[in-house]
């Protein structure tokens, strides 16, 4: 996970209480198309807000958003989305490097599945490039690439301590959230990879030649390799999930998952980006109230709410298309450890709460096993 992006998004992901509007706009055919589409969406949002707020409050709430989306200078690049996040006395506009459909959400927190997908895919990477006895250290992600420092490698001892020295400086660290790519001559590959392995660093070879003239090419190659590693990471998550099912540490039961998420017991959560299940999620108890549709300003997509809880409690969240998930389940989770207490869960429909016990520990799923 990119820590810089995580810090940038924290205020959105962790926000709660009050009316929250999340508006995602994808790349239109033209600026005029964006204005027409946005105009209709804002009318729908206004109608929904008027059911619970007075007209003046609604006008004040939507006015800055109208100014943004009706500005003919706004451009959304292909493959990107524009995210607008609004609550009382708060407005954030972000270019999100995730291709999502145009939609909006009105709830008591922001809709963050596209942001969580951004976090999972846009990992921070460090590039170590050696040229003529000089080490260049770059930091980057899909949006930026910058030089951190340049070091002179005077001796073989300097060469053998590159990774250790950079670790001591806090530039690289043993974490699955950071990727280290190496650009160096072939005779330096094995020593650098060995150093990285000894220090618990995830390092890969990016290339064999570096010069000041090919920095742009190195950046592009690093971005592509990082994307490939993200795909491999997703496949590894599916393998981990398969093993979790065998060991009774995984489930697709949304009620068990919600209870575990509230208790901070979910190690990894995988949710479908293209599925919306509406209702209310109790962050304290993990209880769920399922609704057939988005009924009011307190409703939100339950997958989104559960994902926020897992993220805030330190678990890993993976967002993918439903068709890429096992048996097209919209939500699956791997628990930290087997917990029989999670076999008890509650289903709420209207004013009735039905307590359900699953003493056998078998997977009971609203969406099929």
Image (cartoon, rainbow, N blue to C red):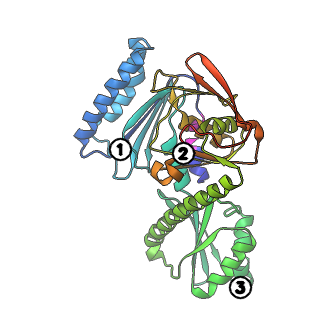
**Disc 2 versus disc 3: nearer the observer:** 2
Dot 2 crowding, Cα within 10 Å, few <14, some 14–19, many 20+: many
Q: Which mark is residue 109?
A: none
Q: Residue under circle 1? A: 26
Q: Nearer the viewer, residue 13 or 145?
A: 13
Q: Which mark is residue 155?
A: 3
Residue 189: horizontal and vertical position, in percent? 62, 82
Taking the magenta stretch, the answer to whether it contains residue 12 is: yes
Quarter where residue 261 is shown: top right
Vertical comparison of 356 with 143: above or below: above
Give the residue furthest to the front.
360
Question: The residue tagged with tag 1: helix, strand or loop?
Answer: strand
- As drawn, is 310 to the left or to the right of 69? right
Residue 151: horizontal and vertical position, in percent? 64, 74
Dot 3 crowding, Cα within 10 Å, few <14, some 14–19, many 20+: few
The range drawn in magenta is 8-14
Q: Is residue 98 visible to us here? A: yes
Question: The residue tagged with tag 3: helix, strand or loop?
Answer: loop
Q: Residue under circle 2? A: 271
Q: Is residue 12 visible to us here? A: no
Quarter where residue 51 is shown: top left
C-alpha distance separating marks 1 and 3: 52 Å
| First along the sequence among labels 2 and 3 | 3
| First along the sequence among labels 2 and 1 | 1
């Amino acid at each position: 996970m990119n820590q810089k992006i995580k810090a940038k998004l924290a205020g959105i992901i962790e926000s709660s209480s009050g009316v929250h509007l999340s508006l995602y706009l994808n790349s239109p055919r033209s600026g005029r198309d964006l204005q027409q589409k946005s105009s209709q969406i804002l009318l729908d949002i206004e109608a929904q807000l008027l059911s619970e707020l007075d007209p003046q409050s609604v006008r004040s709430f939507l006015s800055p958003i109208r100014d943004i989306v009706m500005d003919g200078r706004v451009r959304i690049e292909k493959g990107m989305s524009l995210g607008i996040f609004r609550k009382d006395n708060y407005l954030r506009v972000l270019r999100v490097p995730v291709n999502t459909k145009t939609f909006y959400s009105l709830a008591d927190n922001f809709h963050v599945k596209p942001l969580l997908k951004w976090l999972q895919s846009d990992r921070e990477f460090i590039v170590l490039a050696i040229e003529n006895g000089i080490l260049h250290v770059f930091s980057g992600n899909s949006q930026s690439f910058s030089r951190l420092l340049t070091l002179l490698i005077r001796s073989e001892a300097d060469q053998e301590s590159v990774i250790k020295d950079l670790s001591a400086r806090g530039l690289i660290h043993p974490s699955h959230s950071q990727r280290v790519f190496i650009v160096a001559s072939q005779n330096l590959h094995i020593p650098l990879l060995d150093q990285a392995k000894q220090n618990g660093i995830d390092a890969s070879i990016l290339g064999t030649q570096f010069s000041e003239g090919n920095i742009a090419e190195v950046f592009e190659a690093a971005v592509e390799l990082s994307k490939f590693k993200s795909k491999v990471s997703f496949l590894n998550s599916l393998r981990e999930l398969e093993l979790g099912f065998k060991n009774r540490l995984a489930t697709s039961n949304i009620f068990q998952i919600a209870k575990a998420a509230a208790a901070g017991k979910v190690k990894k959560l995988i949710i479908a980006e293209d599925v919306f299940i509406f209702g209310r999620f109790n962050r304290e108890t993990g209880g769920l109230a399922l609704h057939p549709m988005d009924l009011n300003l307190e409703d939100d997509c339950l997958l989104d709410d559960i994902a926020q809880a897992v993220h805030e409690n330190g678990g890993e969240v993976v967002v993918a298309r439903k068709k890429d998930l096992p048996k097209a389940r919209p939500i699956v989770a791997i628990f930290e450890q087997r917990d029989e207490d999670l076999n008890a869960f509650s289903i709420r429909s209207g004013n009735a709460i039905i307590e359900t016990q699953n003493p056998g520990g078998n997977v009971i799923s609203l969406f099929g096993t």
